[in-house]
Amino acid sequence: MIGFKQVLQGEKTLDPDSSEESSAGRLFVPSLTLANFSLFIVDMIGGVFLLGVTATFFGSTDPIFVAITSQLATVAMLVSAVFAVLLGILSVKFNHKKLLVLGASCIPLGALGCFLAPNLIFLQIFFAIEGIGTTVVMVMTMTLVGEMLALKKRPKAVGWIMTGQTFAAMAGTLVISLFFADVGSWRSYLLWFTLPVSLIALVAAYLGIPSSAKKQRKIVGKEAYLSSFKQVFLNKSAAACLVGNMFAAASVMWMVFFVAFFMTRFGLSLATGALVAFGMAPTAALGQIVGGYLVNKGGRKKLWVTTSTIYGVTLPLLAFVPVLGIVLIIVYSREFISAIGRPAGINLILEQAPESRGTMLSVNSFLTWVGAGIGGAVGGVALAFFDYNGVILAFAAMILIAATIFFFLAEDPCIAMQPDSIKTKPS
């Protein structure tokens, strides 16, 4: 009973009859899903079109020029990490829908700027602007989900929204392969696909998200900002979620080495390796949707820790199983199980500091970028000294560290609400 009281006092929106929860509307989740779909399609110019962009600005695909161009993503990640901290402050004062729309407007602006860029410097500037928009949209998306949806509806919404991000990679890859296969067609890709999609997503966000979002504090000063950050950093469970998710983000960087591992270990061609990686997207999408429906039944913490532990324990199998077919079964099974837990992890973080969601998610975004940097560095060192077996074991260790932190230090503030109190009253 005490835990139930604390939950209600800490977050009024847990009441299924609150006005904020009934104000979302039918277009709310589809609009956010489309907004998140538009976030990663610009990034293709720093990945799939890497050689084309390099040739455009250097007139050569010499490895040194490719290495320089590849830093587009690195610089954008650093800028996004810095802005994530600033966003933690802005989210205290400014309306969250307006912030999301502002972030969504950075996507077409970044796409147009990259299309028109006369040199690599201008391309970097607008690529970073798009990265800032991505950070804002991702953080404000989950903040608005926490503010405007009932507790029991949030996991399903998160599952669908995360699926939008996953399908972006699929759609971008398919569109490129069908219509923009020439390595020099990256500008056409930005103009005819990325720009229209991002503009549609911007309009959808503006029209589909109600203006009746949670009102920001009327008095905003130093104490308000400090109070917001204190609720995040002085809460043991919230801090544990942040640190644990940083290690989880580091473990995701295994995907950087994924295709190279298959090509090296099993002698696959680049095309076949890319096809193997492509199969991860629908597997993850299905898992995230399923996970969104399981969160209320399995619990946020329990579901995330269980799936992450399975993911970490089974990852080393890839280093010792010599049969490609069996390895693929393991890979896709693990990805599906891991994806089931992702909505649970996001929802667990979402509920840690209900009065400071914007700040909590902004700090989480910053540490996610930091974790990605750590993961990439650790993977590179492990590869240099221990080959791919060392890489696999290193990433398995990171996700298991994350699961351990969540298991021992994180708390699910909604556990007292289950199973009866999250049910809506009969109509």
Image: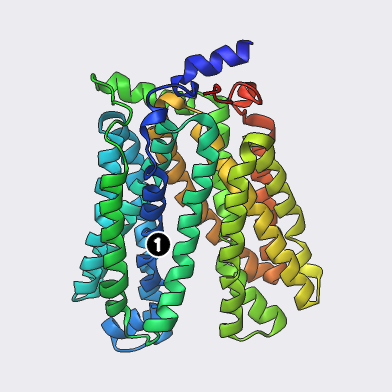
Crowding at label 1, few (<14), some or many (≥20) Cα neighbours within 10 Å?
some
Q: Residue at x 81, y 76 (%)?
A: 322
Camera sees residue 115:
yes
Q: Residue at x 40, y 71 (%)?
A: 44
Q: Nearer the viewer, residue 207 or 187?
A: 207
The three-letter amino acid code for the residue at tag 1 is Phe
Colour mode of the rendering? rainbow
Q: Going by the image, does 395 lie left or right of 118?
A: right
Q: Nearer the viewer, residue 176 or 234?
A: 176
Q: Residue at x 60, y 74 (%)?
A: 259
Q: Quick one: which residue is furthest to the front in this view?
A: 427
Camera sees residue 398:
no
Q: Going by the image, does 231 lie left or right of 196?
A: right
Q: Going by the image, does 393 lie left or right of 256?
A: right
Q: Position of residue 404 (x, y in %)?
A: 69, 39
Q: Is the N terminus in the top left, top right, bottom left or bottom right quadrant?
A: top right
- Label 1 element class: loop
Position of residue 301 relative to residue 221, above or below, is: below
Q: Position of residue 213 (x, y in %)?
A: 32, 31
Q: Going by the image, does 7 lie left or right of 305?
A: left
Which image quadrant for residue 26? top left
| Number of dots carrying numbers | 1
Q: Position of residue 262 (x, y in %)?
A: 66, 76
Q: Which residue is mark 1?
A: 40
Q: Position of residue 186 (x, y in %)?
A: 32, 79
